[in-house]
Image (tube, rainbow, N blue to C red):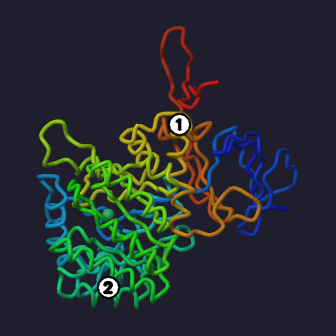
Amino acid sequence: MFDLIIKNASLPDGRTGLDIACAGGLIKAVEAGITAEAGEVIDAQGWLISPPLIDPHFHMDATLSLGTPRMNVSGTLLEGIALWGELKPIQSVDDIITRALRYCDLAVSMGLGAIRSHVDVCDDALKGVEALIEVRRQVAPYLDLQLVAFPQDGVLRDPTAMDNLIRALDMGVDVVGGIPHFERTMADGAASVRLLCEIAEKRGLMVDMHCDESDDPLSRHVETLAYETQRLGLQGRVTGSHLTSMHSMDNYYVSKLIPLMVEAGLHAIPNPLINIMLQGRHDTYPKRRGQTRVPELRDAGITVGFGSDCVMDPWYSLGRADMLDVAAMGLHVGQLSSRADMAWCFDAVTVNSAHIMGLEGYGIAPGCKANMVLFQARDAIEALRLRAHRLATIRAGKVIARTAPHCVDLALPDRPATLDPSDYAPG
Ligand code: FE2
């Protein structure tokens, strides 16, 4: 007797016609023709089942604050940071908790199973830290929330940021963050990377830095991040987020840099929606895209995950917790158009990001956690093309969000009466 059996599912790796049996919160079997009894049976009708979507880079302390206290008129990163500085003193812990929990509701409905959220520690009251630690506790039954201590105003540039960051880690924040390109000088940026990596090494933590989120080709803090990672033996535990300056770097320098990143076992998290919106703002024409070198990093062996970064906050007024939208933008901006490239973009918001976050038991295989999403699409590429409806989000073998398939009634002469958008899949 199983808790749940999903019949006739397709998997992201291309296998079709499989049943998935779950019990005790785990996947027990993935094979064709399972006939056992179950508390609930879902007929997937050949649609795609994948492990949950993962957002490896988000700012949950700012989300859904759009318009408070005002809009970002210029749309730039710097006005966003200034606006955030106006909002921080006037928001309460309860405000942050309320907004974050509403966002997590939306995220679950969109098939997310885990989020890595940065939390600003440049606030002596650490309201965001207190709020998101409480949110992490409350959502734990249905969403894995990993927190990064993020010194938004610069860990050296802001006079109390280092003390606050240490306090945040003592309170239970999971990962060490940073923002070297926002420090006063290149030298301070490099020093901040060294200090923060040393803190992570001493505490046995992972590192995830906003690194070189700039169009300045000489913003090379990722080089220091790679150096400190290998010096301190942190290989596999360190991520560079954004890395947009790599878009503008000299090709010769990049030919040296990427092998250093590989040597250090760095991971990379581009944030396609926000960076196509924010980068290249100082250009006339042609305007740079500002997305880091995604296929080149991938081909070198670096694990790349796409993050959403922002939803309805001082930096980005759109977004709906849709990691397929994020991946589709990364696909377009990176010109990742082959079938293999597009399928890889689905990996970038699922298995790759799960690896970066160090999630255990992630996947569709016996022994994995019974956490899954059912899409109204036949395969991963169709899911991206359609931004497919998430028909069910499953956590520990239970359906925690469910929606009816999208179907349109047509009133056209001599044409079908209904239309299912997922029926347009090739083959
Ligand atoms: Fe960010």
Crowding near the residue tagged with mark 2, few <14, some 14–19, many ≥20 C-alpha atoms within 10 Å: many
When the figure is inspected, residue 348 is found, relative to residue 70, above or below; the finding is: above
Mark 2, secondary structure of its residue: helix
Quarter of the displayed picture in which ligand 1 can be seen: bottom left
Report the amino acid beneath label 2.
Leu
Left or right, residue 348 beside residue 423: left
When the figure is inspected, residue 119 is found, relative to residue 342, above or below; the finding is: below
In percent of the image, x 54 and y 32: which residue is there?
A: 407
Residue 130 location in percent, x, y? 35, 84
Instruction: Please name the residue that numbered disc 2 is placed on.
Output: 165
Residue at mark 2 to residue at mark 1: CA–CA distance: 46 Å
Report the amino acid beneath label 1.
His
In percent of the image, x 51 and y 40: which residue is there?
A: 341
Mark 1, secondary structure of its residue: loop
Question: Which of the pair 21/349 is nearer the observer?
Answer: 349
When the figure is inspected, residue 218 is found, relative to residue 25, above or below; the finding is: above
Crowding near the residue tagged with mark 1, few <14, some 14–19, many ≥20 C-alpha atoms within 10 Å: some
Instruction: Please name the residue that numbered disc 1 is placed on.
Output: 406
In percent of the image, x 21 and y 77: which residue is there?
A: 188
Depth check, mark 2 against mark 1: the one in front is: 2
Tags 2 and 1 touching, CB below 8 Å:
no
